[in-house]
Image (spheres, rainbow, N blue to C red):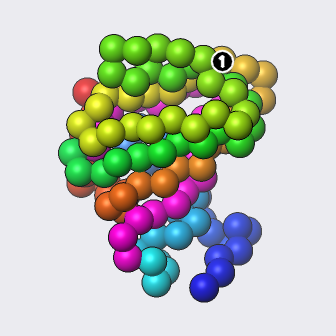
Amino acid sequence: MRTRYNDITAFTTKDGSTIRELMHPNEHKVSKQSLAEAIVPVGTATRLHHHHKSEELYHITAGNGVMQLGEEQFTVAVGDTILIPPGTPHAIENSGHEALSILCCCAPPYSHDDTELL
């Protein structure tokens, strides 16, 4: 199965980022995970949140920012990958001069119901 980026409609998640679900069980034949692109515009940040069940991976594909992961805070840049265990509070701020683009993989798949704002 293949998806085409330009055919996928973007939406805003609870945390405030703009998402394109590249593969998700609600739309595609994948069943145990989801893959999305998240865009965080310049000068903005996602809201602090956690996922009750999903383990999440962020892979930075453009821009740079500051990641809050639990009690830890660190800078992120193109090529960095971050593991976000279930239940871990997290947020990311775009501290650069271009859109911060992140590939997000969730297992089990992303769900609004699994996301709690903090």
Q: How many labels does the image show?
A: 1
Q: Is residue 112 at all visible to an observer of this figure?
A: yes
Residue in front for this viewpoint, 52 or 94: 52
Residue 37 lies, in percent from the top left, at 60, 52
Q: Which residue is drawn at 52% across and 49% down?
A: 104
Residue at image mark 1: 95
Element assignment for label 1: loop
- Residue 15, compared with residue 19, is above or below; it is above
In the rendered structure, the answer to whether residue 90 lies left or right of residue 86 reads right
Q: Residue at x 62, y 24 (%)?
A: 76
- The N terminus appears in which quarter of the rendering? bottom right
Residue 79 lies, in percent from the top left, at 70, 37
In the rendered structure, the answer to whether residue 54 lies left or right of residue 11 reads left
- The C terminus appears in which quarter of the rendering? top left
Q: Residues within 10 Å of mark 1 (few under 14, many from 20)?
A: many
Q: What stretch is highlighted in magenta?
A: 31-51
- Residue 79, compared with residue 43, is above or below; it is below
Q: Residue at x 65, y 81 (%)?
A: 2
Amino acid residing under circle 1: Ser
Residue in front for this viewpoint, 35 or 18: 35
